[in-house]
Image (cartoon, helix red, strand yellow):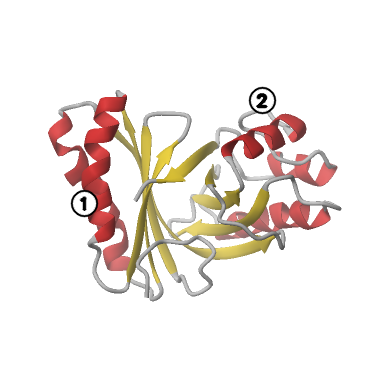
Amino acid sequence: MSNRFCCTDPDIRLLAAGRVRLATSRALETAMAPLIERARTVPTGTLADVFRDVDANALLFVAAWRVNRFEAAERTVVDAIAHAIEPLHGEATPEWVDVAVPAGAWTSGRSGPGECLVLVRQPLERPSAVIQQSWIDRVLLALNGDAEPPDGLISANFFASHDEASVLNFSRWTSAQAHREALARGHYGHDGEHGSIGTSPLWQATRVHPGIRADHEVCRYMRVS
C-alpha cells in the first residue's frame, strides 16, 4: 500500500499539516530535500507528502493516518519542518501547524490527476466545532447549488482542526491557472485572491458566514515528493 498522501482517501481519520515560508528560492531548495526524505521514510501506517507553493517560496508538509494517532500527529510535522530548516539560520519561518479530522467531502464527478492542490485555511473568530461544521456545510451548499462546477475543479475535502479554531479545505484542480480564473470570475471579499470561486448568492454567503474571520489563507501547491 502506498504511503503517499491523497486528500480524497476515504479512510483517512486524522491529518496534520504545516506550512513554512522561506526567504529565498535557494533556501526553499535547501529545505525541500530533507522534507521529501522525511515524507518518503515515514513509519508504516503514515501517509505523507511535500507540496511547493506555486506562487511563493513556501512548502507544505502533510501527514495523515487511517487510525487516530493524536499523540503523534503534530510532532510528526513539527519535527519534519524543524529538521529541514535547521541549517538555514533564520531564512525560514514556520507559519502554522494544524491537526485536523475529516469533516466533509465533495466531488465534481470529473476524473483526472488534479495537478494543483489548493489549500484554503479558514480561521474562526473563536474556537467552535459548531461554526466549523456550519461553514463547511455552507460551502458544500454552494458547491452543490451550482448548475455546473467551476471549470477545473475536481474535488474538495474538508478537515476541522482539533483545536476547533480553523478549517482546512483541500481541493484538487486541473491546474493553478484554472483556480486563478475561477477566483477572477467569482470573487467576493476584499480582493480577488481571497474571495470565492462562484458567483451565486450561496457563494457570497460563504464569505460572510457568522464566526469566520475575513483574513483567510488561499494557496496553490504542486506535489514535489
Q: Give me the residue at 27% from left, 50% from top.
A: 36
Q: Foreground residue, 176 or 56?
A: 176
Left or right: 89 as drawn, with respect to 165: left
Residue type, mark 1 in image: Asp
* Rendered residue at 54%/48% (across/down): 115
The residues tagged by marks 1 and 2 sit, at their Cα atoms, a distance apart of 36 Å
Is residue 87 or residue 194 the one in the foreground?
87
Residue 95 found in image quarter? top left
- SS class of the residue under badge 2? loop
Name the side, left or right, on which 177 lies relative to 27. Answer: right
Q: Which residue is mark 1?
A: 79
Q: How crowded is the residue under tag 2: few (<14 C-alpha within 10 Å), some, or many (20+)?
A: few
Residue sitting at 73 percent across and 45 percent down?
A: 151
For marks 1 and 2 on the same chain, the one whose residue lies earlier in the sequence: 1
Split into 4 quadrants, where in the image is the N terminus? bottom left
Residue 149 % position (x, y): 76, 51
Mark number for residue 190?
Answer: 2
Amino acid type at circle 2 is His
